[in-house]
Image (cartoon, rainbow, N blue to C red):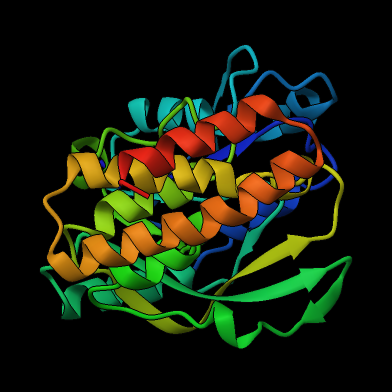
Amino acid sequence: MPFVSVIIPTFNRSSVIIRAINSVLNQNNKDFELIVVDDGSTDETELILSPFIESGKIKYFKHHNRGVSAARNLGVAKASGEWLAFLDSDDEWLPNKLQEQIDYLHQNSTLNIIYGQEIWLRNGKRVNQRAIHQKFGGWIFEKCIQQCLIAPSSVIIKASLFHEMGGFDQEFIVCEDYDLWLKISSLYEVGYISNPIIIKHGGHDDQLSTKYVAMDMWRLRSLSRILMIRNLSAEDKENVIETIKRKGSILKQGYLKHENAKGFEEVEKILQQINY
């Protein structure tokens, strides 16, 4: 049984999927299995992966297109490792990624989730992160409220914790990671490795963050739900409510401008629930 099950979800990424796979296969620590879940690709993904499949270097599963959450969850269902790691098919790991996280885990054995710093490339050029993107370890729920602090490609998480949280919410077409980290950080301490362990590639048209502009609507849904499913401290509850008010106010203005009555009404409903 491998220590870590690595899961790569992919959809029509034949041009970059090999880079992601090789970044896992080239890890210094080899105690893993690699699972690729093809979310209904219509390009040459399956063809170019056939040598990896036939050699047993990867376990390959394909289903009809259902979104990244369903693809990751399917990978977890097929996994046998005690720990899980995820890698988006347009990102890559640095060679010591797994080893650094396993070493960190041995020094902090009470932790059930660890993430790390990233190198950002946009269209092949290095991009400096802004101050608002600063990352933290420990009890980071307050930080996770404000933004999606944790990159899925940088995470290693105990399988039992993932199942306890119910996995990625398949109703979320975006911000499914924000939603999961919010649930986890409201209950558990999060480990953090401050040096880069992954490379995130941005700037391409098929990024979900560029396809769906109203991402804060999904964050608003997650924030409103965390108020219902968690018994938060007074301070955490106030932080969530204030964030809902701030994001909700901005969204309402946008929906009014673009005459989106359905979106406006949903925001109004969420605000009414917190007695806005």
Residue 117, image x and y in percent?
Answer: 51, 77
| Residue occupying the point 38% across, 76% down | 100
Q: Residue at x 51, y 61 (%)?
A: 246
Residue under the image location 45 percent in, 74 percent down: 116
- Whether residue 172 is visible to the viewer of this picture, yes or no, is yes
Which one is nearer the viewer's eye here, 239 or 97?
Answer: 239
Where is residue 31? Give x, y as percent.
36, 55
Residue 87 percent across, percent down from the top left:
55, 51
Q: Nearer the viewer, residue 248 or 8?
A: 248
Position of 95 relative to 79 (above/below): below
**79 versus 205 height, above or below:** above
Q: Residue at x 72, y 32 (%)?
A: 49
Occupied quadrant, residue 258: top right
**Which quadrant holds the N terminus?**
top left
Q: Is residue 5 above or below residue 169?
A: below
Viewer-closest of 30 and 116: 116
Classify residue 192 as left or right of residue 70.
Answer: left
Residue 38 found in image quarter:
top right
Residue 92 lies, in percent from the top left, at: 64, 60
